[in-house]
Amino acid sequence: MDTTKQPIVSGLSNQLEALNFKALLSDNSINLNRNRKHIKSTTRGNFRERILRKVQNRISPEPIQEDSKIPLTCQFQLFQTAMKHLLISGQFMGLNPVSRISDHSPTKIRFTVLSWKFVYGVTIGIAQACATVLCFCKLLKDSVNIVALAYFAFYLSTGCNTFIFLRVASKWPTLIKHVYETQLDSYIDVKVKNKCFAAYIIFFSMSMTEHMLSLLSKFVITMDCLPKGSDLFESYIIRNFPWLFEFDVPYYLPIGVILQFLTLVSTINWSYSDLFIVCMSIYLTSILKQINKKIEMAGNSNHLPIPFWRTLREDYTRATRLVRSFDDTISSVIFLSFASNLFFICLQLYNILSNGVTSKYNLLKEMCPNYPSGPLGGYEQIMYLLFSLSFLLGRSLVVSLVAAKVHSASMVPASALYNIPRNMYCSEIQRFLDQVHGDKVALSGLRFFYVTRSLVLSVAGTIVTYELVLLQFSNED
Amino acid sequence: MDKDKFQEFLPTMSRIFSMTRYFGVSTCKPSIAFGWTVILLLMLLAIEVGAIWKIVRLLGGWAVHSTDSRGFTARLSGCIFYGNALLSLILSIKFVSSWEQLSERWSRTETDPGLRLPSDSRIKRRTVLVSAFVMTCACVEHMLSMMSATGFDCPPEEYTERYILSSHGFLVQNDEYNLWLAIPIFIMSKLATALWNFQDLIIILISMGFTSRYNRLNTYVHRVVMLERNLKEGAQVSSENYMRFQIWRRIRQAYVRQAALVRLVDDQLGALVLLSNVNNLYFICLQLFLGINSKDRGSFINRLYYFISLGWLMFRACGVVLAAADVYIHSKKALISLYLCPELAYNLEIKRLKYQLKNDEVALTGMGLFSLNRELLLEVAAAVLKYELVLVQYDK
């Protein structure tokens, strides 16, 4: 939707200027295909653009596209294709219930309260909220111990996650509209699709592995101490959901199945928000990196006139506006993700450092009749603990570093712009420099903190401090 | 020749890097030195795996001994010490391999802008002095450590046994000791100490090179500005506008190229900077904690060794940060001269240069996580103090 309306006289001089510089340009390394892509769209294009297209056809008949095999022609299509798997699998867990989320037409994407996806999401959220309340009651009943605290924090953070994603879903159509309207179609990087898919596969497989290991270790513990003649599944459910059954709720098979399903959904939910942030950051970083590449190539050429730099600066501005728009939508997800990662890392590290990798149960295990009965010969719990901790640490590190790349990519143009020689220097370049230095372009956590590389260091310092303080509690026991 | 005087720093560095072959840091080209490097790498890897396995045994509850010198702290420190040596070796090899390209780019940056900068005649002497100083202190400290581990009253045939068991107790139990294990460990401990000092030395030397170059640029700018000020009204450095623009343009381009060079070297060196700082921070905290908390101080030699090693560690850590901070400070010093520029001589190039110097942050960073300047030193000191105050309470 081209909204630049200029008076006729300056419009003509702009056209002449544009014709001039396209005629001067002898190397095709700079992608001038912005206007070429507008041929297909009927909502864009005006008289000026059509003249430019005709001239370009005569000068450089071969279109130089980033990758001529892939038919992705606009940002919106790239975004939808790259995020398809992520968003649809999120909806299986009740997250981000936008109807027709992977549709290729932005008008069909809508958020309505009356859709079954919304109801499903709200149901899961309410179930997690009930679990949170029950865990809290159990925490009050018994003394504060790590396991109960972990359960409480787990259901609290996944419940909050579900409700936060409901809010994201309500803002999603606006965001999609912004992605559609942003005129950055010449900065498409098709590798974003592969990167997002690879991230999706890695996160999901590791999350499923963690869940399988957790199930395995819990089943093995149940099997070890199974009194003869009782049902395996029933004793497993009763042992592992004490926050429900200690309040004298009778056991029925459907309840067990529902509880197991809730655990599965919550476990994947826990790492889903990290995956979500990683994919969004990959997408935003790719746009900024393409702009940086273009600036660098332009810096190496001999003469490019003022309209070129003006267009480039405006593209950079549009990219930063896109980053801000994404930030407004997903900053609550980032905040919750960082907070819960920090809390769980501290908890897990404290658990391992103070109790060792063996738990109190392992000492009692040898008194159980069927010990050892699992496939790993008694080491399932240790493996699960170690895998869970390393997955958690790896996840937090990856999220922080990938999200910080958005900020680093936005600062890169400065060094190329300093190098512009005298004959190309103009007020547009000075404006561009002012913008690069003056604006803080980064993803944030509800504006409490900006995700940059220095954040990683301060979070690590915080974790070390808290661990050192917490470890004294175990010394006093 | 004139040209040689400008570029004394680079040949000195190349000669230093060629001498590092003796403790395993060599380029990746296949040769005897590279073979020695591979052997050292494998031995370090074996020791590191052994140290990690001991920690896992302790955490898993299978450890047989967990007294003081075999407790968690000792095992963790041993693991971190050899882990640092391993990573430092790998990163130093990477850096030294890329040094040829970097030095080529560096010498091109020196000659390209066509400015006749004043030369820095003392850089070579300073480089050699600093390297010799670091090496001597490292040797003295290590010899003291050997003496402190075994004491003076040790019969020679038991020397290796007592030394290995007391300094590497986290790795080798009393019953696991044999001579075939002891000799590689002995060599590796010397190597690891050498690598630990070398990683700090590289950073200091490169920072000194950058600082010297910035100094020369700043002195030149100062001279040009002073010349413009001292001339009578109407007369300028050159009577033609074009020549003045040329000089300032070349100065600006020199600063741009220098900033690009610093960034390029920072990309290669960043991991070493991060590793060195983290390692120094951990060992300073650890030594302070052990010193404050230990009740039995041991003999005179033990106490002397403790103070000398802690002092040397702190001196080296501060030296690294201060040397690197100098790069940042000197990159902005020309601003002071530029503010003195008289009105008649002021032009667009000077304006661009001022903007650039003010806003462009040129510093060595640890892989982008933190940037080495003087404020960092204060922050790290505050962090060390905080951790010590927390750790001291363990005893109570």
Image: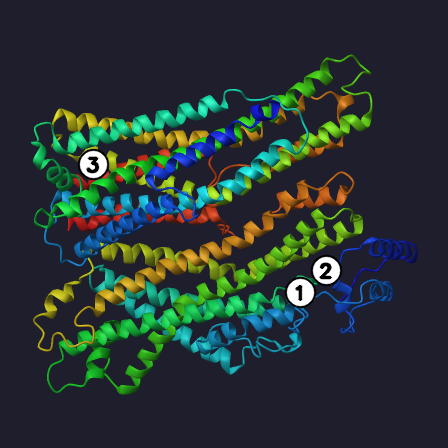
**Labels 1, 2: one chain:** yes
Give the residue type at disc 2.
Asn
- Disc 3 to disc 2: CB gap under 8 Å: no
Find disc 1 in the rendering and name its residue. Answer: A66
B213 is higher (above) or lower (below) than B282? above
Quadrant including the C terminus of chain B: top left
Residue at the extreme right of the image, as rendered: A9
Task: Name the residue at 24% across, 63% down.
Answer: A147
Chain ID of residue with mark 3: B
Find disc 3 in the rendering and name its residue. Answer: B290
B126 is higher (above) or lower (below) than B26? above
In the picture, the disc for residue A31 is: 2
Q: Measuring from the top left, give residue B246's x and y in whole percent.
A: 75, 30
In the picture, the disc for residue A304 is: none
Q: Is residue B326 visible?
A: no
Q: Give the alpha-carbon distance from disc 1 to disc 2, as whole Å.
A: 8 Å
Task: Name the residue at 59% across, 60% down.
Answer: A286
